[in-house]
Amino acid sequence: MTLTDKDFQLEFRTEIVSMPGGEQVKRCYDCGTCTGVCPASESGSGFDPRKILHMIKTGMKDRLLGSPTIWHCTHCDTCRFACPQNVRFCSVVDVLREMAIQQGHASGEGCEKWGTAPCKATCPAHISIPGFVSALAEGRYEEGLKLIKEEMPFPGICGRICPHPCEDECSRGNVDKPVAIEYLKRFLADRDLAKAGAYVPQKKPLKKERIAVIGAGPASLTAAYYLAIEGYGVMVFEKHPVPGGMMALGIPEFRLPRSILQAEIDVIRKLGVEIRLNVEIGKDIGFADLQKDYQAVFLGIGCQQALKLCIPGEEEFSGVLDGLGFLKRVNLGDLPAARGKLVIVGGGNTAVDCARTAKRLGYESVTILYRRTREEMPANFWEVDDTIEEEIDIRYLTLPVRIRGEDGKVTGVECMRMKPGEPDQSGRRRPVPIEGSEFKIQANTVVAALGQTPDLGCLPRPLGETISSKGFLVADPQTGLTKVPLVFSGGDVVSGPKTVVEAIAAGKEAARSIDRVLRGEDVHTGRGPQWKGIKYSPETVEKRDREIMSRLSLAERKNTFHEVDQGFDKQQARCEADRCFRICGMPRER
């Protein structure tokens, strides 16, 4: 390649460093560490981060903006914490791509500004999955953990209970089986928490503004985490005696050990977040007082009010409980005294959690009644598999129609058999009663696990007037803004019951909005990348077995609340991480 004076435009570097993200170029001193760890640079595509940075410094504007190589960065962030100067190379690439688009250098296939691996695009929190997996495979455990904790505060928790939609999109799954992303996240978190001092992100200088956070569930604690990192004083108000929301009250310990939950919440406390327990808004402290004493309020009270069965006898006899209440009592140590025959109504994760909990408590029998087929159960299929393996009876196509009892106590459930009908709005087949199929099931306790809705009694009148027809608080799903100035919300109270990782994503976005509003910035502009997953389809690749996590035996877990899944050891984790292709998200041609 012959270069002339026209190829060098020295003002190019100034253009780059004047744009947000581009200023990092000034910190680079051409050590080449970024290229050394970059998976794309090993792919044969000609991608070379060090060379790109050098071309910026030397002013090779047209050659660089017209080159296909700037589109080969997959935003994997593998180089993020490897760089000794803390240069986030993908941010520099974002500046180059934006400039290339604006100045007419980018067109056609292969110019996807926010192209990345499908796993990262699919993750609600948009964790840099290829980056942390790559770091783990190479034994750079601290770097991998830091990448995760840039996007979420709970890798140990989500490494156990996340439904891992990222794995459904893993390109490796087209060859053999998806990479065990969830388990790898857990490995890094557990390794960090086992150390004398767990990793605590660096905070910015303390700001004068203080933020009130209502609720201590995943959305609220995530908002508190990011606001504290930005330097705000944060006070969390929680009405229960323990923090964690449904993570603490609604998930059994055999799925999520309390030691892990508390350890990750302790990291948030170490950032300076204060958590006041046993404080109920509207009772112990007024909402208006919070608005007066704090510069912004985040409302993340979740969905903790259970839906009722709405059948005869439900309110007539003792022994009818709701699923959340049952799990909450057990998780707080208030174990039921009588443990006879228990029937659970519902097909979601709460229903199977109640069933597996009751089995461990020693109930005489445990039965789940579900009105549809197994294929239509909303519970995670692996949780249903575990429920069946633990010898819990699930009766499909069964509808409770009446609670029976004597002397004020439940004695059984009157049911009707169902058959699948036409699909309803959810896409599932509507269950249709079979006339004359009534039968009875004996029960001393009936647990209704049909879903939940928010309890919005603590809301002031202006917010109380912005409740949706489904009973959820109305807030902008992207920004968390409500109709009341400086009051933000997110998580299940806005979206309805969803996953922990989705609540985390909502809390993170709300924290970003609060920071912008308090700094006088527009809350809507440039909210963040619109990630687009680009799959990688290798022509030839060796099939490799997915690592299998060890578990407690069936005999061991029948009578104990010890964690069922035992985690990967170091060798398993690195072998599993090495199955990742690492270059998903890179366009193959332009």
Image (cartoon, helix red, strand yellow):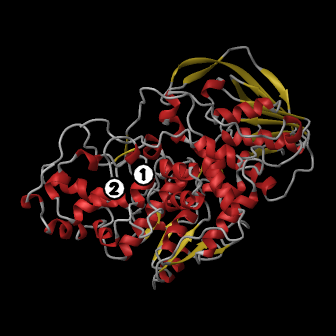
Which residue corresponds to mark 1? Answer: 38
Q: Residue at x 57, y 31 (%)?
A: 177
> What is the tally of numbered marks visible in this picture?
2
Mark 1 element type: loop
Mark 2 element type: helix
Q: Residues within 10 Å of mark 2 (few under 14, many from 20)?
A: many
Instruction: Answer left or right for 6 relative to 245.
Output: left
Give the x, y percent position of residue 466.
44, 58
Q: Mark 2 vs mark 1: which is more N-terminal?
A: 1
- Work out whether residue 411 can be spotted: no
Q: Residue at x 44, y 64 (%)?
A: 83
Residue most extreme to the bottom: 208
Give the x, y percent position of residue 312.
73, 35
Above or below for 425 versus 52: above
Above or below for 325 versus 370: below
Could you tell me the amino acid type at mark 1? Cys
Above or below for 470 versus 191: above
Which residue corresponds to mark 2? Answer: 49
The front one of 19 and 512 is 19
Q: Quadrant of residue 522?
A: bottom left
Discs 2, 1 touching: Cβ within 8 Å: yes
Give the x, y percent position of residue 584.
42, 40
The front one of 21 and 206 is 21
Q: Residues within 10 Å of mark 1 (few under 14, many from 20)?
A: many
CA distance for labels 2 and 1: 8 Å
Could you tell me the amino acid type at mark 2? Pro
Give the x, y percent position of residue 219.
55, 59
Instruction: Answer left or right for 487 relative to 572.
Output: left
Instruction: Answer left or right for 363 relative to 414.
Output: right
Above or below for 244 versus 164: below
Residue most extreme to the front: 2
- Work out whether residue 350 can be spotted: yes
